[in-house]
Amino acid sequence: MSDPQPEEKNIFQRIIDREIPADIVYETERVLAFRDIQPQAPTHILVVPKEPIASLEEVTAQHASLLGELLVAAAAIARQEGLEQGYRLVVNCGRHGGQEIPHLHVHLLGGRSLTWPPG
Ligand code: AMP
């Protein structure tokens, strides 16, 4: 019998660990941001914690400052991208939320007028 395989790293963790390329636009000690590979708006950037948190469902009060850093990063990137006319942040959580990658991420969408409500 073969040894059990270690749990596979998700794609965002592989980007954080520089195992696969990404168009990185912003980085701090605890946060990384890169362009979405299938952009849904002229600007579509994913802001992720370097710490492996699977989803918002996992977070506790201990993560409060890191979650704040994600929003501060998103606002800084929006300024960097020239999104003066506005933008939207989205965090998909779980199956009904449409989350596909099990690593917490904030979508930053801008560069066009966005409709509401989302689908
Ligand atoms: P979610 O559905 O909220 O989990 O969003 C996952 C997002 O990751 C989608 O918008 C994908 O287009 C995006 N994505 C998947 N693989 C990559 C990749 N290698 N580089 C950048 N974005 C990716």
Image (spheres, rainbow, N blue to C red):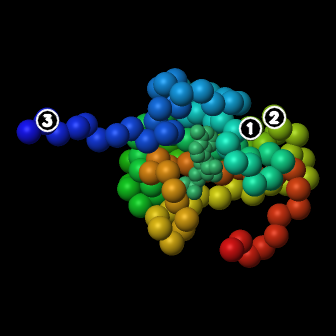
**Residue drawn 65% across the image and 58% down it:** 90
Crowding at mark 2 (Cα within 10 Å: few <14, some 14-19, many 20+): few
Q: Residue 70: percent from the left, percent from the top?
A: 59, 43
Asked if ligand 1 lies within 8 A of label 2, the reply is no
Which residue is nearer to you in this view: 101 or 3? Answer: 3
Q: Residue 51: percent from the left, percent from the top?
A: 43, 37
**Residue drawn 88% across the image and 40% down it:** 82
- Is residue 95 shown above or below 19? below
Q: Are marks 2 and 1 in contact (CB under 8 Å)?
A: yes
Which of the two marks, 1 or 3, is nearer to us in this view?
3
- Is residue 111 shown above or below 31? below
Closer to the chain start, of discs 1 and 3, is 3
- Is residue 5 shown above or below 39? above
Question: Can the viewer see residue 70 in this picture?
Answer: no
Which residue is nearer to you in this view: 70 or 107? Answer: 107
Q: Are marks 3 and 2 in contact (CB under 8 Å)?
A: no
The quadrant of the picture occupied by the N terminus is top left
Q: CA distance from mark 1 to mark 3?
A: 45 Å
Residue where numbered disc 1 is placed: 76
Residue where numbered disc 2 is placed: 80
Amino acid beneath label 2: Gln
Residue 21 sits in quarter: top right
Q: Is residue 26 left or right of residue 64?
A: right
**Residue drawn 46% across the image and 36% down it:** 13
Q: CA distance from mark 3 to mark 2?
A: 47 Å
Residue where numbered disc 3 is placed: 3
